[in-house]
Amino acid sequence: MSFTFLEKEKEKEKEKIEKSESTDQNSWGVWKTSTCFIHLKYRIKKKSYGEWAINFKNGYNKSISMSVGIKEGFGGDRFTVPSGNSRIHSGYYTNNKQATYLNFTVSRVKFGDTSWGGPYAGCD
C-alpha cells in the first residue's frame, strides 16, 4: 500500500495547475503557455451554464498524450494532440456557473506514445 501512496504523491508533484481567463462567452481567450511544458499552449472558451472548452496546441516535434482534470468542478479526459496541431475538448464544468476562469491540471504526459501506463514526462 505504501508504494501506491508514494506513486500517487509523485504524480501529484508532476501536476501543474493552469489558470486561464475568458471574459467573453462567445469567443476564445488568448493563447497561454503551459506552466510545465513550454511548447504546449492552450486557450479556453466559456460555453454556457458553467461548461468550458479548452483548445490545446502542440508545438513539440512529437505527439503529446495527456490527462486533463478540472479543479473546482468536474470533467476530464485523456487524449493525444499530434505534433504541430491543435485539438479542442469540451465538457469541462465549474461548480460556479458565473466563473470567469477555469483551473485545470495537465498530467500523465507522454511524448510519441499513446499508452496509459508510465513512465510519464516531467516538466521542461
Image: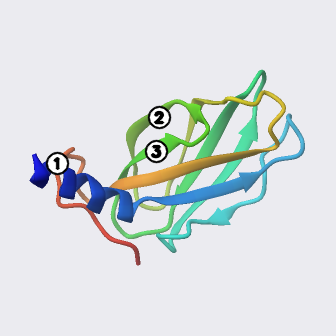
Closest to the observer: 120 or 98? Answer: 98
- Residue 51 screen position, x and y as percent: 69, 27
Residue at 17% across, 61% down: 119
Q: Which amino acid is tagged 3?
A: Val
- Residue 31 screen position, x and y as percent: 70, 61
Task: Determine which residue is flagged by label 2.
Answer: 76
**Residue 11 occupies quadrant:** bottom left
Label 1–label 2 contact, CB within 8 A? no
Q: CA distance from mark 2 to mark 3?
A: 5 Å
**Residue 78 occupies quadrant:** top left
Label 2–label 3 contact, CB within 8 A? yes
Q: CA distance from mark 1 to mark 3?
A: 15 Å
Q: How many numbered circles does the render carry? A: 3
**Residue 34 occupies quadrant:** bottom right
Q: CA distance from mark 1 to mark 2?
A: 17 Å
- Residue 69 screen position, x and y as percent: 48, 42
Q: Residue furthest top?
A: 49
Residue at 20% across, 51% down: 5
Question: Is 22 left or right of 124, judged from the image as shown?
Answer: right
Q: Which mark is residue 106?
A: none
Figure check: 62 above or below 2: below
Residue at 50% across, 71% down: 39
Task: Determine which residue is flagged by label 1.
Answer: 117
Q: Which mark is residue 68?
A: 3
- Whichever of callouts 1 and 2 sits on the residue coming sooner in the sequence is 2
- Secondary structure beneath dot 2 equals strand
Q: Which amino acid is tagged 1?
A: Gly
Q: Residue furthest right?
A: 24
